[in-house]
Image (cartoon, helix red, strand yellow):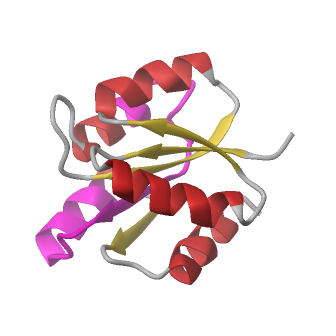
Amino acid sequence: MGVKILIVDDSATARLQAEQALKGMGFVVIQAEHGDDALKKLAEHPDVKLVISDVTMPWKDGFELLAELRAQPATQGLPVIMVTTEGSAPQIGKARKLGISGYLVKPYKPEHLAAAVKKLVA
């Protein structure tokens, strides 16, 4: 079975686009609609090797999700790529401070996502 990647985004379209790109690269994709859903999916799939998360989502946003992942021993080293329409220096700085592994600004090209993913799950 291929490497599992969790995509977290409240936009079904964004999840589908990322899933198509990743499945084309041979990855197994799991989807979550927000941070709380992502934590549930990670508990169900502890073999996930990478999380790709939007920042702005209801219930638990990407920053809250990242902080929780970094606080838990089982997920503190799990690579996380943030994907968002907001590419401001303060937002990127906040993500880095929380321990982000990568950051992409939407809309992104599938090859940029592929390069980021390959770097982290080679």
Asked whether residue 99 appears in the rendered view, the answer is no
What residue is shown at x 53% (from left), y 31% (from top)? 75
As drawn, which residue projects farthest toward the right? 1
Q: Which residues are magenta?
A: 68-97
Tell whether position 64 is magenta.
Answer: no
Residue closer to the observer: 74 or 53: 53
28 on left or right of 8: right
What residue is shown at x 12% (from left), y 69% (from top)? 90
Quadrant of the rendered structure where residue 34 is? top left
Residue closer to the observer: 41 or 89: 41
What residue is shown at x 31% (from left), y 24% (from top)? 36
104 on left or right of 78: left
Q: Position of residue 22 (x, y in %)?
A: 64, 61
Q: Position of residue 40 (x, y in %)?
A: 44, 19
What residue is shown at x 42% (from left), y 33% (from top)? 69
Asked whether residue 84 appears in the rendered view, the answer is yes
Quadrant of the rendered structure where residue 32 is? top left
Residue closer to the observer: 67 or 116: 116
Q: Quadrant of the C terminus?
A: bottom right
Q: Quadrant of the N terminus?
A: top right
Number of numbered labels in the structure image: 0
89 on left or right of 38: left
Quadrant of the rendered structure where residue 87 is? bottom left
Q: Position of residue 114 (x, y in %)?
A: 61, 73
Residue closer to the observer: 52 or 33: 33
Tell whether position 81 is magenta.
Answer: yes
